[in-house]
Image: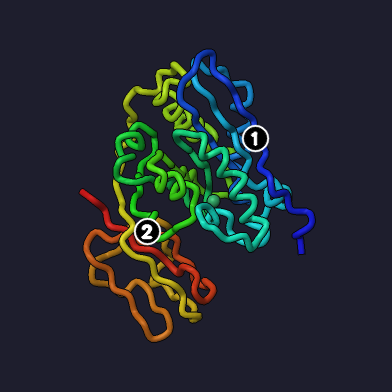
Amino acid sequence: MNLKKFSESPEVITILGQKPGSTLAIMVGVHGNEKIGPMVLNKLRGLRLASGKLHLIVANPTALEQSARYINVNLNRRFDSGVNEYPEDRLARNIQTYLDSSDALLDIHSYNETMDRPFIIGELNELPLMAKMPVSIASTGWDEFEQGASDYYMHKRGKIGLCLECGSSDRPKQYIELALRCVNVFLAEYGLTKHSAHLPTTVPQKHIKVASVVHSDGNPTIFSANYSTFDELEPGIVFAQMGKRTFTANQGEHILFPRTNAKKGDEAFLIGNQII
Ligand SMILES: [Zn+2]
């Protein structure tokens, strides 16, 4: 229905440093209802770089305009696929040209829950970089379950791809400071800025690896409590029921993105294990 109006090009500002160096990408607005990203990007427009090149990418201008998570299909599952079915597929290919010229990506998101529990998604080799960011949870293992995400795309090419999930989409202003601190760490890591961002973070960081995903069979998922993402489950208790299936927690398991009314085939919840 919105096919004609859909912009298949991202909005990109490229900032050049004073001398050659790494090329980085900071992306926002993959989901148009997540306003934190554009707020952060506005703070970065006048940035001066010591070296390298920085692409500031507003991924999905149409979705942002409409404050919609997506218009036709979730853009963050369309990277790295050969399909050309939706306008989002062509948008993803256009964004990929910027990702292809970048050494590393920081993709800034928020999520549709009410709690404040920022976390950052990456893979095992990225844990040392994630540990420098003031975020209390680093989560790995997503590439196996969420193929077609922007970070997945970078990883498949042997590059760095981090996804910062700031907190509730309802309170974007609350996370600007946090996101900017993560941006500073990211830029300083590659020498684009000479910021003192390498100071150790004072935030202890848990590592939680995604272990499984449960898809909806069409029945609602009834949870035993009002769980939020990364809540630790009590071992031995039945924490969810879907139709006749029940789900019992094991030691060290956390619930991620619980959704009572996921559509058939969509994710009802994920389980993550804390890695000591
Ligand atoms: Zn998002």
Element carrying mark 2: helix
Q: Is residue 22 above or below residue 268?
A: above
Where is residue 210, by image quadrant? bottom left
Sequence order check: which comes first, mark 1 or mark 2?
1
Q: Which mark is residue 12?
A: 1
Q: Amino acid at mark 2?
A: Glu
Viewer-proximal residue among 251 and 196: 196
Tell me what residue is drawn at x 32 percent, y 26 percent.
200
Q: Position of residue 79 (x, y in %)?
A: 53, 52
Tell me what residue is drawn at x 32 percent, y 35 percent.
131
Q: Which mark is residue 144?
A: 2
**Relative side of 18 to 158, left or right:** right
Q: Position of residue 205 (x, y in %)?
A: 31, 40
Tell me what residue is drawn at x 49 percent, y 18 percent.
20
* Quarter placement of the N terminus: bottom right
Where is residue 268, by image quadrant? bottom left
Tell me what residue is drawn at x 52 percent, y 39 percent.
99
